């Protein structure tokens, strides 16, 4: 069984590469960013709370995200494996994911980290802003997201280094080049 966490800073291509991974591997896709945006679109209480934070570039509290993630896992009891996009995003979430998987007799096969310089990330996100108009893709909010990433999300790398599950990938290049690098890691897991 293959369980992959796709990791990286905002705009590193997690969502983009996830689509390619799903075409090739039969995994259940869990993107916490997408799930939160769905909650916002449906104007649920949780969505309204999440929107206030996302629009400022902040992370959503662990307990809210974990509740949504667990629901999605429970709705797919026969999954052959999961692709986690954008989760875990804090050291605590990484520990929680280990527990959630082990309760279901599973474990994470590897954490694949897309590494992209900040200048390129900013350019990508500002470019996306022109086409998709996401409320968190403004220059000010992007800067706040990078700060949040450095302080709260980067420690996740140490968590997986400690488990020998951290696999850094050069996230600069064409979509196919990056996908080939990811596949190489998966083939060696
Ligand atoms: P996410 O939806 O996960 O969004 P992201 O980090 O901005 O994007 P991603 O890395 O997927 O980039 P993409 O492929 O789209 O999170 C949004 C927010 O939700 C977070 O800021 C947070 O507030 C909240 N949240 C989510 N999960 C959470 C959690 N676990 N805990 C707490 N809060 C959570 O690529 C970006 C752009 O680059 C696209 O336009 C794409 O076309 C382009 N691109 C991709 N690859 C490229 C390449 N190789 N070359 C050039 N351009 C490329």
Image (cartoon, helix red, strand yellow):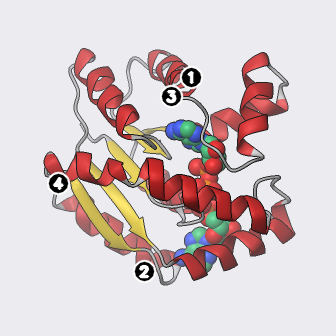
Q: Please name which of the two marks, 4 or 1, marks the residue nearer to the observer.
A: 1
- Where is residue 150? Give x, y as percent: 47, 58
| Distance Cα–Cα, label 2 vs label 4 | 19 Å
Q: Nearer the viewer, residue 158 or 34?
A: 158
Q: Is mark 3 within 8 Å of ligand 1?
A: yes
| Distance Cα–Cα, label 4 vs label 1 | 28 Å
Residue 134 falls in image quadrant = bottom right
Q: Is mark 4 within 8 Å of ligand 1?
A: no
| Distance Cα–Cα, label 1 vs label 3 | 10 Å
| Mark 2 or mark 1, earlier in chain | 1
Q: Is mark 2 within 8 Å of ligand 1?
A: yes
- Seen at 25% across and 39% down, the residue is 108
| Distance Cα–Cα, label 3 vs label 4 | 28 Å
- Label 3: which secondary element: helix
Can the viewer see residue 89? yes
In this rendering, would 166 be left or right of 53? Answer: left
- Label 2: which secondary element: helix
| Mark 2 or mark 4, earlier in chain | 2
| Distance Cα–Cα, label 3 vs label 2 | 33 Å
Mark linked to residue 177: 2
Q: Please name which of the two marks, 3 or 2, marks the residue nearer to the observer.
A: 3
- Where is residue 70? Give x, y as percent: 47, 20
Mark linked to residue 161: none
Q: Is the C-beta separation of discs 2 and 4 under 8 Å?
A: no
- The residue identified by callout 3 is 62
| Distance Cα–Cα, label 2 vs label 1 | 32 Å
């Amino acid at each position: 069984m293959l369980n992959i966490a796709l990791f990286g800073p905002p705009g590193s291509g997690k969502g983009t590469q996830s689509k390619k991974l799903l075409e090739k591997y039969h995994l259940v896709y869990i993107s916490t960013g997408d799930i939160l945006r769905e909650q916002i679109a449906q104007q649920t209480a949780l969505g309204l709370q999440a929107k206030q934070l996302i629009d400022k570039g902040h992370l959503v509290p662990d307990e809210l995200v974990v509740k949504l993630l667990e629901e999605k896992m429970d709705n797919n009891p026969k999954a052959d494996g999961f692709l986690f996009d954008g989760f875990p995003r804090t050291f605590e979430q990484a520990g929680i994911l280990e527990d959630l998987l082990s309760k279901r007799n599973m474990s994470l096969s590897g954490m694949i980290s897309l590494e992209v310089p900040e200048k390129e990330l900013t350019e990508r996100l500002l470019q996306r802003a022109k086409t998709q108009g996401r409320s968190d893709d403004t220059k000010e909010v992007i800067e706040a997201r990078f700060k949040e990433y450095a302080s709260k999300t980067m420690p996740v790398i140490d968590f997986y280094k400690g488990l020998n599950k951290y696999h850094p990938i050069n996230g600069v290049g064409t979509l196919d080049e990056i996908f080939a690098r990811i596949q190489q890691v998966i083939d060696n897991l």
